[in-house]
Amino acid sequence: MSYPRLRAVLETVAAYKPSDGLHGPAERPRPLSANESPHTPLPGIVEAIARAGATVNRYPDPGCGALVRAIARAHGIAEDRVAVGAGSVALLQTLFQSVADPGAEAVYAWPSFEVYPTLAALAGVTAVPVPLADEAHDLPAMAERITPRTRLVIVCDPNNPTGTVVDPDELRKFVASVPPTCLVAVDEAYHEYVRGPAAPGALALCADHPNLVVLRTFSKAYGLAGLRTGYLVGHPHVVERLRKASPPYAVSTVAQEAAVAALGLEERLLRRVDETVAERTRVRDALVGAGWEVPESQANFVWLRLGPDAAEFGAWCAERGVAVRAFAGVGVRVSIGSAEDDDRFLAVADAWRTSRKAAEA
């Protein structure tokens, strides 16, 4: 049978696989694979969604004007420094497409956010992954891989899936070292969960570096994963061109209105983030106390160093009704959920260790 001729890269590029699935006899699934907020939307956000729902016979504002204004006001920056997209993934796609001259390369740490190599391949950009050092970005090694062909450098901070952060001084020096003709994107999808010296993030660096953009999302801390809304902050020259490269009407009216409402309720939402951070500490302490190797996380998940046992452990959890994210041969990422879901995961993890010890005896 003959089929339409599509791009050859589509035969080899990996499809995104959200989780290992749940197929065990659990009383209810425990969704700890996608780094979602365990909290349902606040009433004010639900009301905004309902109001916007009455207008969906009309196209949304293609410029996301009200949302851009709200983001700019929240960060104390000019509106021409903000671009909005259907999730930060859509903005990342726009970045890759916007730098995709023949021979262009993109440098990023690995393992990191799984969509980077896919977006690079689809854009025709050569991916240059740089191995992590102790689960963290090796910025000197990344700097060494930058060449005249490099058009994009991505720093995922905190890193997904390991949860580690970049030292702010090291990041500042790294950004300053990148040639001004190369775009640097700091992916801060989990920024709100960071505590300690790295908490301010990279936004303050944008004023001094026209080649720097910072991406954030409403999917994690703001609890709007199902509505797909993210934003980018950068120099007006860059933002204007990225807006041109983005499809019109990409962010629905419902998503725009919900995000505006979320920014208006930020104080209450960030109290929920504090709860997740406290739960993160509890879960990690329990795992470390039980003998697991778990680096300190600054995101809404923890990372288990499991190496060749990662796939087996992921399947073990799925069979017992707990969805986690296994990275074969490397490790397992476990989202922080409700205390009840986290306790179920800890019990399943403890049972796995007990089973392994019995098998090795």
Image (spheres, rainbow, N blue to C red):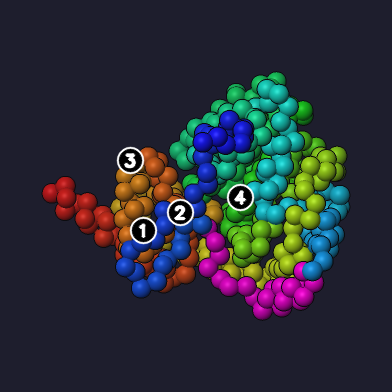
Look at the numbered discs 4 and 3 and tell me whether their residues touch, using CB distance below 8 Å. Answer: no
In front of the other: 149 or 135? 149
Residue 87 in percent (x, y) is at: 67, 54
Query: Does the segment drawn in magenta span residue 246?
Result: no
- Label disc, if present, on residue 318 of the rendered structure: 1
CA gap between label 3 and label 2 equals 18 Å
Amino acid identity at mark 4: Pro
- Residue 197 numbered mark, or none: 4
Magenta region:
35-56
Residue 61 visible within the image:
yes
Q: For the residue labelled by badge 3, is the local secondary structure a helix, a strand or a loop?
A: helix
- Relative placement, left or right, of 46 versus 313 is right
Callout 2: SS: loop
Reading the chain from its start, which is encountered first: label 4 or label 2?
Answer: 2
Q: Do the residues under discs 4 and 2 have CB atoms within 8 angstroms? A: no
Question: Element under label 4?
Answer: loop
Judged by depth in the image, the label closer to the viewer, 4 or 3, is 3
Separation of marks 1 and 2 at Cα, in angstroms: 9 Å
- Single out the mark in the foreground, 3 or 2: 2
Q: Could you tell which of marks 4 and 1 lies nearer the N-terminus?
A: 4
Residue closest to the far front? 1
For badge 3, the amino acid type reads Pro
Reading the image, the residue beneath label 2 is: 19
Q: Residues within 10 Å of mark 3 (few under 14, many from 20)?
A: few
Judging by the rendered image, the residue that carries numbered circle 3 is 308
Q: CA distance from mark 3 to mark 1?
A: 17 Å
Question: Decide: marks 1, 2 in contact (CB < 8 A)?
Answer: yes
User: Along the polypeptide, which appears first: circle 3 or circle 2?
Assistant: 2
